[in-house]
Every structure is written in C-alpha cells, then in structure tokens.
Amino acid sequence: MTAPFAVLHVCTGNICRSPMSERILDGLTGDDVLNHGAGISAFHEGENMQPNSVGELRARGYDGEGHHARHLTRAHVESSDLLLVATTGHLEYVAERFPEALPKTFLVRTLGRIAADLDPAVLPDGDAAVRGKALVALAYERRGDYEDVDLADPWGMGQTVYARIADQLEDALKPVATALEGPS
C-alpha cells in the first residue's frame, strides 16, 4: 500500500466546522485516508471541539473525542494531498499564503458536488492515494463549472444550526469518500 491520502480540513478556529468535516470523512473512509485539520486563526489553538459539534458527531455515529485545535502551518499544507476549506475566505487565505496549494484546495461543499457528478469509471483503479490524486486533478479542471458554496459558521449558534452544518458536510463528503474508496 502507498502512503495514505492526506486530507486537511480547514476553517477559522478549527473548533466547529473543520473538526466535524475531518471526523465525518474519517468515519466514511478507511485507513488509507488520513484526515487532519487546522484553522486559519490561532485564537482557539489547543482548545477542544465545540460541544455542539461533538454532539452532532456522536449522534451520527462519528468519533468526537480527542480533538485539539491547531493553527494552519506550511507543514500541514505541504503534507496534505487535498485541502477542504469551509468558505471562499479560507480559500483566499490559502491562495495568498500558499499559492502552490491552490490546485489541491477546494470548498468542501463544492468538491462534494463535483465528486457526486463524476462517473466512477473516470477514476483509476487503485487505493485511495491513486484515486484521490486523480480526483483532485479532475476537480481542478472542473472547478470553474461549479458555483462556490460556503459552509456557514455555526459558532455560538444552537444545536439545530450545527445539525444543518453536519447535514451539509455529510452530503458533501459521502461522494468524496465514494470517489476515494472506489467501488465496493
């Protein structure tokens, strides 16, 4: 087996959206996908995931334990094969500071739509690393055909808002997981 396909999930503080995204995709994929996250702000560095995020993950059968927020660094970006960001603001942040990463950086909801529209036959046979690199290349070619769709920030909102964000993440990440994992 090749090295795991590394997916970096990015939001503002790495306490709400990106940890939910990370844990949902981790629950949908196998050991050949490495999910990790970071925030563009260091304000919450070291903090646990927001309790409402943990609650949504648990209610859906995903692991919500052991998360500690991290601030996005060049090492995180360079060690990742795919960056999934929550908003166009996060995409712009990555583009400004790590322009070389733009071809592998996507809004999570937009990549979900691209992956959902892909004919599985266009991705090569192989493990998640092989399929993931092909998915990233195809998505980069098609990115302009899709509307940018942000993932709203639920911080400070009630559980229903977190539930809506988790629904949107599952809708986006299930086709991505299918593309990475290949036919069952």
Image (spheres, rainbow, N blue to C red):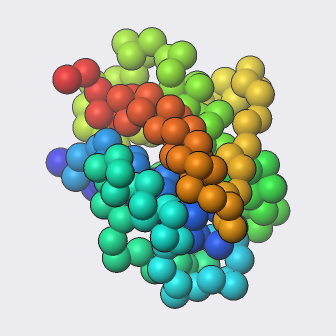
Say which of 137 and 159 sits in front.
159
Q: 131 above or below 5? A: above
What's the residue at 62%, 83% (across, down)? 44
Residue 79 x, y percent position in the rendering: 47, 65
Q: Can you see residue 1?
A: yes
What's the residue at 29%, 43% (across, down)? 29
Q: 98 above or below 178? A: below
In the visual, does 133 lie left or right of 100? left
**Quadrant occupied by the C terminus:** top left
Q: 122 above or below 25? A: above
What's the residue at 25%, 31% (across, down)? 126
Q: Can you see residue 8?
A: no
Residue 165 x, y percent position in the rendering: 59, 46
In the visual, does 159 lie left or right of 64? right
Say which of 75 and 27 sits in front.
27
Residue 107 x, y percent position in the rendering: 66, 43
| Quarter of the image where one finds residue 134 | top left
